[in-house]
Amino acid sequence: MDLLIIFFILFPILIKNITMSEEEPLNYFQSKGWKNFLKKTKNLSILVLAVSGIFMTFNWPFSSVLFILGLSSVMYYCFFKSIGQKPIVLVLSICWGIFLMGVVFKLMHWPWANMLLLIGGVGAMIQSILSILVPTEVSDSTNGIFDSKTFKNVMKYAAGLSKAVSILGIVLLSFRWSGVNEMLIIGFSSLALTYLLGCLGASTLGQKLHGVGWFVSLMGLLFAWFDWPFYGYILPIGCVLLIIDSLIAALAPIEE
């Protein structure tokens, strides 16, 4: 508990020190150094979450601490990633951070957890639905249907709606309302499927590993939540794939 409190206090201070620069603040938040710091933060956070998933599966010690640390790091990533962007983008990104903060508070049985989950969840659902309106990127490759604009639009719609349903399921779970199981099954399974189908048109091994890793991990989480058979195999395999993918992404060449 003390370790987690210290982490919550010191992480923003660390961010502030790292971001000190002679440049204009908004210019710095658009710089290559800042973007790569965020990229490494995100991927290392996912790595810690994946490790915590393996620890939870085998009931090893410190699994809860690792999970909270990983989730908290992703939360701070959401708070800081859109600084310097348009106000609506910044607000919606902060909503994702508030939603994750609500999850952390709920797990730690801290006050205001339900309020944070509700406020952040509504904003995160809005962001997920609005992401459907973003123009679809189409590459110049000729990989058939999996690289077509129509297929990518379908995957974009499915991903946005799946995230919204998953968030709604977590909010309903927090308030112990009815329909939780159905929401979680539909949201997580459909989101997992979008990751799997989305990587079929990927051109690199890393992109394919990313899709497969998230698919297996999300299905493992779903199986673990409902105590379905084989979750003890599915979840660790997915977590190992996410660890490898996160390491590759974190060590990738610096963006220009």
Image (cartoon, helix red, strand yellow):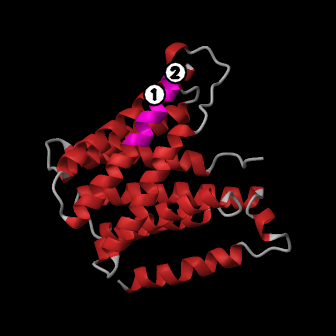
> At 43% across and 64% down in the image, what residue appears?
120
Residue 154 badge: 1
Magenta span includes 158: yes
Q: Which residue position is annotated with label 2?
A: 150
Q: Position of residue 241 (x, y in %)?
A: 42, 43
Residue 1 badge: none
Looking at the rendered structure, the kind of residue marked 1 is Val
Q: Is 165 above or below relative to 138?
A: below
Q: Position of residue 53 (x, y in %)?
A: 32, 56
Q: Residues within 10 Å of mark 2 (few under 14, many from 20)?
A: few
Q: Position of residue 118 (x, y in %)?
A: 35, 66
- Residues 116 and 22: in front is 116
Q: Is 180 above or below relative to 99?
A: above
Residue 238 shows in the view = yes
> At 34% across and 45% down in the image, what residue appears?
217
Q: Main secondary structure of the magenta part?
A: helix
Looking at the rendered structure, the kind of residue marked 2 is Thr
Residues rendered magenta in the picture: 150-161
